[in-house]
């Protein structure tokens, strides 16, 4: 296998893993954030965020992203310096928290954000580009193999959970 083909397969594998990871966690994270959003103090915060003018809504949406960067960089540093498991756990935790938080915040700030012309244009571009990239990744044989593996794991976990309950 040529180096370029190998690199392409590695990048496809990483992209497929990220997509599968987000798809696998999206519904459970949404349910968790919905429950979290019912807490009185969080509901008050959500109402305040929903009412922000566009520029403040942008700051509320992007602020947590900036706060998570040091965790991700630190996790990568730990991986590079021989602390692979701890670094991986920190990186994945930051990814999970970030995905849940950004989805929740985007739901609250989207109406205001879409009134910012450059943001609305960038959002449509990123969304459309992401849709095309995900469609291409999903058409790859490696993605299909990873999806089968994910579904097999999910089935085994469900069987295990049923056997533990019964």
Image (cartoon, rainbow, N blue to C red):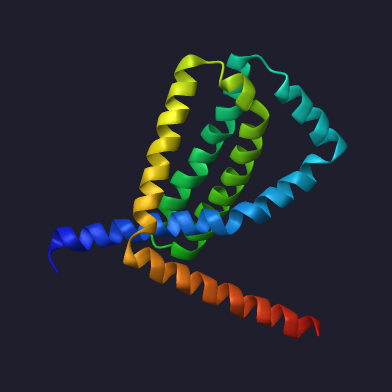
Image quarter (top left, top right, bottom left or bottom right) of the C terminus: bottom right
Image quarter (top left, top right, bottom left or bottom right) of the N terminus: bottom left
The picture quadrant where one finds residue 64 is top right
Instruction: Give the image location of residue 73, x and y in percent.
Output: 44, 45
User: Residue shown at 63%/76% (left/top)?
Assistant: 157
Q: Depth check: 59 or 18 in front?
A: 18
User: Residue shown at 39%/71% (left/top)?
Assistant: 145
Can residue 72 be seen? Answer: yes
Instruction: Give the image location of residue 130, x and y in percent.
Output: 41, 42
Q: From what the image shows, is residue 68 above or below residue 56? A: below
User: Residue shown at 49%/40% (left/top)?
Assistant: 70
User: On the picture, is 2 further left or further right than 80?
Assistant: left
Instruction: Give the image location of residue 36, x and y in percent.
Output: 78, 45
The picture quadrant where one finds residue 14 is bottom left
User: On the picture, is 49 further left or further right than 153?
Assistant: right
Q: From what the image shows, is residue 60 above or below residue 128? A: above
Instruction: Give the image location of residue 134, x and y in percent.
Output: 40, 50
User: Residue shown at 62%/17% (left/top)?
Assistant: 56
Residue furthest right in the image: 40
């Amino acid at each position: 296998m040529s180096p370029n083909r190998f690199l392409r397969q590695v990048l496809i594998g990483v992209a497929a893993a990220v997509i599968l990871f987000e798809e696998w966690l999206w519904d459970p994270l949404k349910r968790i954030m919905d429950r979290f959003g019912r807490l009185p103090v969080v509901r008050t915060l959500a109402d305040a965020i929903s009412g922000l003018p566009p520029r403040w809504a942008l700051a509320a949406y992007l602020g947590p992203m900036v706060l998570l960067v040091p965790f991700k960089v630190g996790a990568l540093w730990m991986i590079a310096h021989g602390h692979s498991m701890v670094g991986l756990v920190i990186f994945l935790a930051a990814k999970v928290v970030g995905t849940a938080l950004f989805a929740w915040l985007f739901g609250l700030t989207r109406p205001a954000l879409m009134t910012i012309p450059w943001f609305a244009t960038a959002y449509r571009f990123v969304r459309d580009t992401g849709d095309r990239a995900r469609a291409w990744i999903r058409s790859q044989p490696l993605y299909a193999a990873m999806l089968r593996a994910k579904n097999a794991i999910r089935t085994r976990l469900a069987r295990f959970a049923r056997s533990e309950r019964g």
